[in-house]
Amino acid sequence: MPSPQHLLLKQFLTAATAPLARRRPSIAAMRLSLEIGSLFQFLPWGVHLDCFSLEGMAAEWIKPENANPRRVLLYLHGGGYVLGSLNTHRSAVGALAQRCAMHALTIEYRKAPDFPFPAALDDTLLAYRWLLRQGYRPHDIIVAGDSAGGGLALALLLALRDNREPLPAAGIGLSPWTDLELPTATIRRVAHEELQLLEALAIRGWGGLYADTTPLTAPLVSPVQADLHELPPLLLQTSDSEVLYDDVLTFAAKARCAGVPVTLQTFEGLVHWWHLFWRFVPEARQALDQAAAFTNGIWAAQQAAARVLHSLRAPARRPDSRARV
């Protein structure tokens, strides 16, 4: 059962989106609304911000004081490939990075409709390759994202695999958008609730803006359509009441059949993007804590494997040839 704080959040979001049922605001107006909302979101205490230009692209380092500087969380914000920015997700990324004790790199990737596919994926590949050129090792990088950013993180893994480039240690998808076709069955499932129906209809249109002339079924557009073999361990989080729930379950099942280690965590009755409201929604803090536990498990598995490899490579001790009288 969702918490009272989440119920209040849901009532607020329902009231705030009610005008959308009567008129369709422009993408520019929705972007402005999100930017205004982000003015009230702040980084957690003890997390520092470093803004810079990554080969001409706006980017940020988010650095918790407790972080291991060798490990990086490459985080891709959500927003249906048309909305969202560094500002809208900075607080939640900071909370996640602090829990994971990692530095986080976030980028202002290009968005539709001005820059359709593959612009966002190209920017993401640019950021990942830049990390490698800075000396970060692939097995010290975890790629993460929410909603469309989660789908973009999965597309990045697929593109790296197909290009035979080194893969990061793991991927994290927080309610990732894996199927831009958004099946009609999903629309029917959420049609009883105004907030979810509006989300479904909106992102269905945004999917077309992002794909543009590329088929919605292209694997790097809709990762659920891809061959998912040889991907690194994945963490997928979703709520059973949000629009993308069915797609996440389908992707998780397909990835497992391909031999990918998948950790699927489902929550009950939560709205899409609940992670962003971590300051006052306990389920958001719980989800971020579980994501941190997943990353800790990745590092622990690496250390265990390194110990085993070291023991196999260590020369056997020669017996003492000196006779004892």
Image (cartoon, helix red, strand yellow):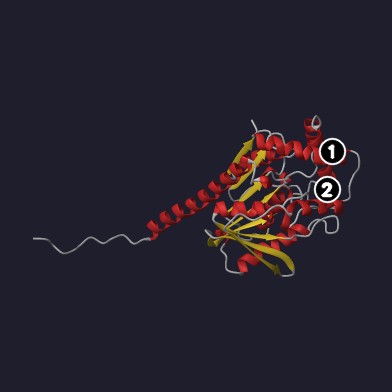
Q: Which mark is residue 62?
A: none
Q: Is residue 138 left or right of residue 186?
A: left
| Residue 257 seen | no
Q: Which corner quadrant holds the C terminus?
A: bottom left
Q: Is residue 33 left or right of residue 317?
A: right
- Give the residue type at disc 2: Trp
Above or below: residue 155 compared with residue 271: below
Q: Position of residue 79 (x, y in %)?
A: 76, 50
Which one is nearer the viewer's eye here, 40 or 221? 40
Q: Residue at x 70, y 34 (%)?
A: 7
Identify the mark nearer the N-term, 1 or 2. Answer: 1
Q: Which mark is residue 206?
A: 2
Which one is nearer the viewer's eye here, 186 or 10? 10
Q: Residue at x 74, y 57 (%)?
A: 121
Give the number of the mark in front: 1 or 2.
1
Q: Quadrant of residue 21?
A: top right
| Residue 51 seen | yes
Q: Judge the density around disc 1: few (<14), some (14-19), many (≥20) Cα neighbours within 10 Å.
A: few
Q: Judge the density around disc 2: few (<14), some (14-19), many (≥20) Cα neighbours within 10 Å.
A: many
Secondary element at image label 2: helix
Q: Is residue 8 left or right of residue 19?
A: left
Q: Position of residue 295 (x, y in %)?
A: 55, 50
Q: Which mark is residue 18?
A: 1
Which one is nearer the viewer's eye here, 315 or 105? 105
Residue at far front of view:
40
Instruction: Measure how far apart labels 1 and 2 are at the Cα level.
Output: 19 Å
Which one is nearer the viewer's eye here, 269 or 319? 269
Q: Position of residue 306 (x, y in %)?
A: 44, 56
- Give the residue type at disc 1: Ala
Secondary element at image label 1: helix
